[in-house]
């Protein structure tokens, strides 16, 4: 009798346990029985890249676009507002974070003073039940965001 390496209760590929119940590349799966589903966690590499900074001309608002690859299904389940932190050295800012299923993180930052050239840090942590990796940290200057 054949046994399954994993069983997450669905037939979707790309979530760690394939439609044929084998553990997919860059995932680790555990648990799973006749009465409970396997839990799969992404353990491969993730690349985070700042692709665009655009200042809104009519307000003290900047839009930052980050690209996160590979585009894995586990990221769709994360609330990025809980795991993404933007800090701009010496400036008080508020921001919102959104993620789309194409791997794009959009940060809308509101600020009260000129942030041109300010040293900035974007930190992305992961829900460890979905992605078993350390935080990604990008440091950059708010330059040329017109």
Image (cartoon, helix red, strand yellow):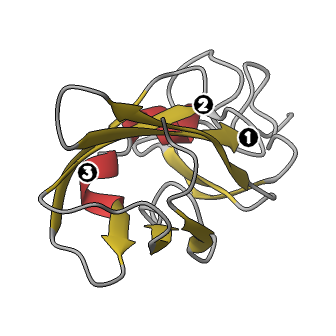
- Measure the C-alpha gap from mark 3 to mark 1: 18 Å
Q: Residue 92 vs residue 45: left or right? A: left
- Secondary element under disc 2, as helix, strand or loop, is loop
Residue drawn at 34 percent across, 66 percent down: 85
Q: Is residue 138 visible?
A: yes
Q: Quadrant of the N terminus?
A: top right
Q: Residue 84: give x, y in percent of width and height.
A: 37, 60
Residue drawn at 52 percent across, 21 percent down: 101
Q: Which residue is mark 1?
A: 69
Residue closest to the eye, 51 or 57: 57
Q: Which residue is mark 3?
A: 81
Q: Sequence order check: which comes first, mark 3 or mark 1?
A: 1
- Secondary element under disc 1, as helix, strand or loop, is strand
- Secondary element under disc 3, as helix, strand or loop, is helix
**Decide: marks 1, 2 in contact (CB < 8 A)?**
yes
Q: Quick one: label 3, few (<14), some, or many (20+) residues within 10 Å?
A: some
Q: Which residue is mark 2?
A: 103
Q: Residue 100: give x, y in percent of width and height.
A: 46, 23
Q: Residue 92 vs residue 21: left or right? A: left
């Amino acid at each position: 009798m054949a046994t399954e390496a994993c069983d997450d209760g669905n037939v979707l590929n790309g979530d760690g346990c394939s439609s044929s119940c084998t553990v997919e590349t860059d995932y680790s799966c555990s648990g799973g029985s006749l009465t409970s589903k396997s839990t799969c966690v992404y353990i491969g590499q993730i690349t985070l890249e700042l692709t665009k900074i655009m200042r809104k001309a009519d307000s003290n608002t900047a839009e930052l676009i980050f690209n996160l690859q590979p585009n894995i299904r586990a990221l769709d389940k994360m609330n990025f507002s809980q795991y993404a932190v933007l800090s701009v050295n010496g400036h008080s800012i508020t921001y919102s974070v959104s993620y789309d299923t194409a791997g794009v993180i959009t940060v809308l930052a509101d600020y009260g003073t000129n942030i041109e050239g300010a040293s900035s840090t974007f930190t992305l942590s992961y829900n460890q039940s979905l992605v078993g990796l350390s935080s990604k940290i990008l440091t950059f200057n708010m330059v040329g965001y017109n």
